[in-house]
Amino acid sequence: MFYDRANELRTLLWHHDRAKERNQLVVVYGRRRIGKTALARRFIEERDGIYLFIEPKSEELVFRDAENAFGYRTGTRPRIDCWTDLFSLARDRGLPLVLDEFQNLGSVNSAAYSTIQRVWDEMASETGLMVVLIGSYVGMVKRTFRDSRQPLFGRATGMIRLLPLDARTSIGMLMDRGMGFEEALESYSIFGGVPRYLLEISPGIENLSRLLFGPSALLREEGTNIMALEFGSLHKGYFSVLESISKGKRTPKEISDVSGMPIATVSKYLGELSEEYELVKGELPLTSENKRLVRYRLTDNFVDYWFRFVHSRSSLIEIDAERALRSAREELPIVVSRRMEDIVIQLLLRKKDIISPSEIGRWWDRTGEEIDVLSIDQGSSKVLFCEVKWKTSRTGCDAVRELKRKADLVQWRKDTREESFLLVSRAGFTKSCLDLMDREGVHHWDLSELKRRSLDPT
């Protein structure tokens, strides 16, 4: 099945229609395994087109591959000797042209980007041509088209960043393949919404051992491959920052202390990881603009998990994989709890039956007090305070009282706001807690309610 990506497919189809008025150069980019090729192939099915995977080999052989691709699609194998031939042929036959892993062009010919820029500029006033460039290195793609010093700067008529599937789609995808809801939640918390990883997961199988901790685990080196491709020979400094964040070091000072790097160097890496590579996100407490309170977190579930449990324990995995696996399993509830905050945010944004958020996020102060999810509606002055409890024991009345105590610390429109509260508990709630929440109007979601909301199509 082809999951989600409806908006991205519509965007590609729109650009194809637009090519009748002006040639279109569309860039589709995103991290490895995210489904870029699947999207491109679905687009080609919708609008007959030419798909060409760029391998790092001679330019002459790339053009021979292009001839074969045209021959496969049209039944007639043309002669292609240069980029002008390739683009002109696609235009004349009205076939969109997809170049997958186009970043390999630099290995094919160091002047390839400049040549394509010249050819594209020569054809700029023409119509009927759509070229889709697919790239896996987020930083490189952004530099190629957004850096004024690069040949292809400003040439793209559209850029599509392919993100991981959201929690609802990922969980539904796993359940469609026979997995139970709670196991699907755990799998999403580890592997995120990366389609290729989700397709490797088998219901009822020890997937952590098979994919990450076993002797021939398919994804054990995946983090290294992703980072080395993005960062090249400079990856060690980035690795240190990412590993520190995965272990809960969220501020530049904390990262500096544990990594041994100067704060200025840490800040430089954090800026690049946030802005160029989009692997890290800096967050402020909702309702606060105090930049001294900024915390950083990894945006990719798999990268976060890989750094925390695989990369940092690589020696242990080599000598005692079973022990490393047991340790990872023991800490799984903590992993899921952290990701459940993001899932709850997604559900609140989607359903909007408790509050219609104009802003949603997390809250903390300098003393260490935290609220898992805080949602506000600026127009109505409504505010929702939410805590997530991912333990095997039922949640009791103390959790209600503690949430209300922490809510009182949040100063936003304290005298005029309309407050509501939500508790989310994996194991459900004690009878006395349910009675208390019913009396005080506190919303509560157990595992069955989470499942209902996650799978509700409306």
Image (cartoon, grey):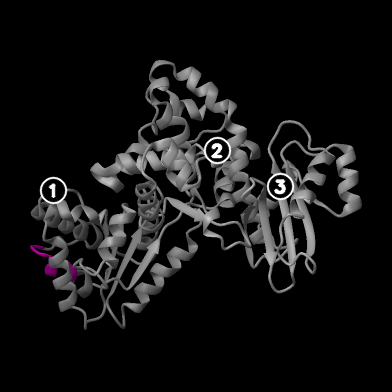
Which is closer to the viewer, label 1 or label 3?
3
Badge number at residue 57: 1
Q: What is the span of residues highlighted in magenta in the rendered image?
A: 80-87
12 lies left or right of 130: right
Which is closer to the viewer, label 2 or label 3?
3
Residue tagged by mark 3?
A: 387
Badge number at residue 238: none
The structure residue drawn at horizontal position 13% and vertical position 63%, both measured from the top left corner, is 78
Label located before the other in sequence (2 or 3): 2
Seen from the viewer's position, the closer of residues 413 and 384 is 413
Secondary structure state at the residue bearing disc 2: helix
Residue tagged by mark 2?
A: 187
- State the CA–CA distance, disc 1 to disc 3: 54 Å
Which is closer to the viewer, label 1 or label 2?
2
- State the CA–CA distance, disc 2 to disc 3: 22 Å
- Classify the position of the C terminus by image quarter: bottom right
Q: Amino acid at mark 1?
A: Lys
Seen from the viewer's position, the closer of residues 249 and 74 is 249
Seen from the viewer's position, the closer of residues 215 and 359 is 359
- State the CA–CA distance, disc 1 to disc 2: 38 Å
Q: Amino acid at mark 3?
A: Glu
